[in-house]
Image (cartoon, helix red, strand yellow):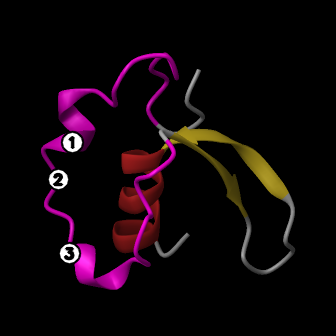
């Protein structure tokens, strides 16, 4: 399960997440090449959990994580 949206990691991120507009220029090339990412704290470097790639983009752009 995705630690951000709670959806299954074997499926795409749900509509309430994917409907958010993402500025893809903020992200490195290939950001979406892998469907599952490990979310981590940028201050401590500690892993917080697995997330959909799109959820990771939302966390980065909207929550600064």
- Residue 28 screen position, x and y as percent: 44, 78
| Residue 63 on the magenta segment | no
Give the SS element for disc 3.
loop
Label 1 secondary element: helix
Q: Which residue is mark 3?
A: 23
Q: For mark 1, what is the residue?
A: 18
Decide if residue 22 is on the left or right side of residue 44.
Answer: left
Q: Position of residue 22 (x, y in %)?
A: 21, 65
Give the magenta part as a residue range: 5-34
Q: Label 3 vs label 2: CA separation?
A: 10 Å
Q: Quadrant of residue 57?
A: bottom left
Residue 59 in the figure: left or right of residue 61: right
Image vertical order of residue 3 relative to residue 54, above or below: above
Secondary structure of the magenta portion, mostly? loop
Residue positioned 39% across, 77% down in the render: 27
Location of mark 2 (residue): 20
CA–CA distance in space, label 1 to label 3 = 12 Å
Locate the C terminus by quadrant: bottom right
Residue at image coords 13%, 61%:
21
> For residue 36, which quarter of the picture?
top right
């Amino acid at each position: 399960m995705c630690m951000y949206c709670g959806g299954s990691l074997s499926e795409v991120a749900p509509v309430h997440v994917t409907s958010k507009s993402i500025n893809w220029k903020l992200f490195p090339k290939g950001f979406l090449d892998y469907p599952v990412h490990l979310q981590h704290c940028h201050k401590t470097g500690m892993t917080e959990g697995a997330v959909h790639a799109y959820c990771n983009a939302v966390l980065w752009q909207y929550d600064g994580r």
